[in-house]
Amino acid sequence: MPLKGLAKDSALAAFVALILAIPLVGLNTVERDGRIVVETRFSWVAIAVVAVFVGRLLLGLVPRRQKQATDKRPLAALLDKHARALGWCSLAGLVIWPFLPFSSTYLVDLASNILTYILLGWGLNIVVGLAGLLNLGYAGFYAVGAYTFGIAAQSFGLGFWEALPLAGLLAAAVGILLGFPVLRLRGDYLAIVTLGFGEIIRIILINWSSVTGGPNGINDIPRPTFFGLPLTARAAGGGETFAQFFGLSYSPQHRIVFLYFVVLGLALATNVITLRLRRLPIGRAWEALREDEIACRALGINPTSVKLSAFAIGALFAGFAGAFFATRQNFISPESFGFQESATVLAIVVLGGMGSQLGIVLAAVVLVTLPEFGRDFAQFRMLLFGAAMVAIMVWRPRGLLSLRAPSIRLAPSSERR
Amino acid sequence: MSYFLQQLINGLTLGAIYALIALGYTMVYGIIGMINFAHGEIYMIGAFVSLTTFFVLGAVGVTWVPLALVLVLIAAMGFTAVYGWTVERIAYRPLRGSFRLAPLISAIGMSIFLQNYVQLLQGARVKSLPPVIHGGFQLMESNGFVVQLSYLQIMIMTLTIALMAGFSIMIAATPLGRAQRACEQDMTMAALLGINVDRTISTTFVIGALLAAVAGTMVTLYYGVIDFFIGFLAGIKAFTAAVLGGIGSLPGAVLGGFVIGLIEAFWSGYFNAAYKDVAVFGILILVLIFRPSGLLGRPEVEKV
């Protein structure tokens, strides 16, 4: 673009920024001495306008790459090629992670948190990435899992391991119940219905106080045991504890490391199941359905049942993640399962490149670790989060690491390379 | 009976506000077939702009209510329209022709961004506006219960009906409306025939934002309290209204808005206010199952 046109463009952008900034950046109503007065912050407006002008100018100066006909992704292709090796390496790293010299309670706990999101991301990936169904109420299933365990522990005295399958199955059942009527809908309708479903779950959790504890949530959720051995300082019923059984001196770190391995196991199971499912007819049907529903129907695939299976399996993993979340936190309340949670998991899937297992791991690491750097940043976390979602969609609509190649091809492709 | 009548009036007022937002959803969906997820946030911005303008006018000394109202509406519509235009330009236009979910995800990102943007700049606490329009009619009185119909409620309802009628005429009879309908049917063909598709779509977003700004101003006047989060629920409910009425149809959106408002008012009046949102979403699910094209919509035929 010629420089003159660019300058004109930037000036226009700056002008728009000025109009945008005046009412919300430039003016603010504050209460002072019991009266509401209007406060002006025109210096901020000036900064915003200059920033937009310079930003637009710089953006225009960057030479625009020619759009390639095929979306070749050197990095993604490289990672994809070595995905197996990379996967084993990271697995080995994850197993020895708690025993590394520099790892602390904090780092292990952070890793557990990241793994929970990876688990959620992989679960949602089946729904969004593979089957192409946009689910905006994923936190609803997560909540069902967490509350199943919470209520089962509180009312029936079930432990983590007994409640875990129950939590998964109940979440899957809720998924089927919701999916049955709504999966015939088009993609965007489905998105809104699932969003409404997530809200319904949250409202019920808040208001059904006799069962869910209302806004206060459920306290004292039991911790998992190691084959019946509690990881506490003293066993409740006078039995042996984990430390006594193995002749170790008790340390609270045992529990955190154990929780880490529990979630690592759950995540690995999810990964293996997903990778296997992708090779089964059902997994191929998911991907085919994502690409073209009408063609699938013509080939005799029943879209509703195929979608329903994706929906239920996604919900199942969310239920597992919810039960783990409950046992790790020891406490659950409706606040943890709002729309922001659904949006975070969705962002992990989308940023990772829908359909890519490895991409989801990367995205989860980035999105969970970022807010840990400095509390000042936490305030801007969601702001940047939203902006990043828009930016990535605009620049790389297919996500950071996605190839979106079909898992299987009928014949060698005829394109010459 | 009098309680019923009061709930009816309240529900219609609430429904009028939803209808104004739903009009924006339905127009955008009609033309590019995407859910403008950030539309609720545009409405929220409209509410903030109108609140600030009220205080600015108060500080400047404009206290004659009709003049202040007109100025506030103009300011809210003007600024909010620019927001609507910018959102389309930044988040949606580059994604035209991309895969189906991309604009929707970008819209969700935009919605999260705008919410936090307003929260950071204007604070997380609720902001309140003292009542501006006082008075109304007392329709009837029985057993000490007075049925009120305030001037503000009348204004909100008439404005909604007038705007719906105005835009219906615009779509039916003006060159812009013709261009919009052409883009709705076939964008490529419309472009070949000399219609500036990008400009038409931008105009649609601007109109949607104008209507949302009116809704935002009305809600600020009606409830007197706003915060950065009001756009989320209002947005979903307005979308529900648009779907209920048949997405793409302007009278449908208004009808849907009124129905949703009435359901909400009667549910809180006669059953349990805590579950009113559950009732609304339940209705949405039921409508989508039994009548996916809505009350006034045309069935959608998918072609290969």
Image (spheres, coloured by chain):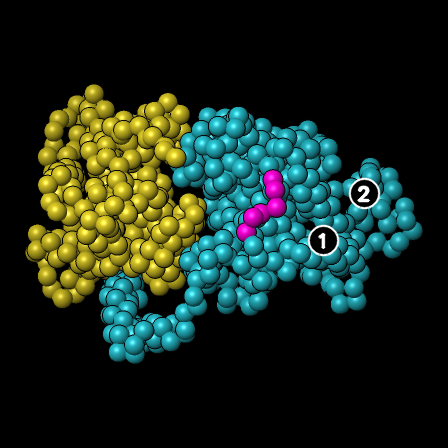
Chain colours: A cyan, B yellow
- Reading the image, the residue beneath label 2 is A226
Q: What is the quadrant of the C terminus of chain A in the image?
A: bottom right
Kindly identify the residue that appears in the image at 74 percent across and 36 percent down.
A161
Amino acid type at image mark 1: Arg
Q: Which mark is residue A84?
A: 1
In the foreground, B52 or A377 = A377
Are dots 2 and 1 on a single chain? yes
Magenta segment's dominant SS is loop
Residue A75 placement (x, y as % from top left): 59, 62
Residue A96 in the figure: left or right of residue A39? right
Q: Which residues are magenta?
A: A410-415
* Image: B35 above or below A251: above
Q: Is residue A292 visible?
A: yes
Q: For marks 2 and 1, give the CA distance.
A: 31 Å
Q: Numbered disc 2: what chain?
A: A
Q: Is residue B119 visible?
A: no
Residue A196 placement (x, y as % from top left): 42, 37
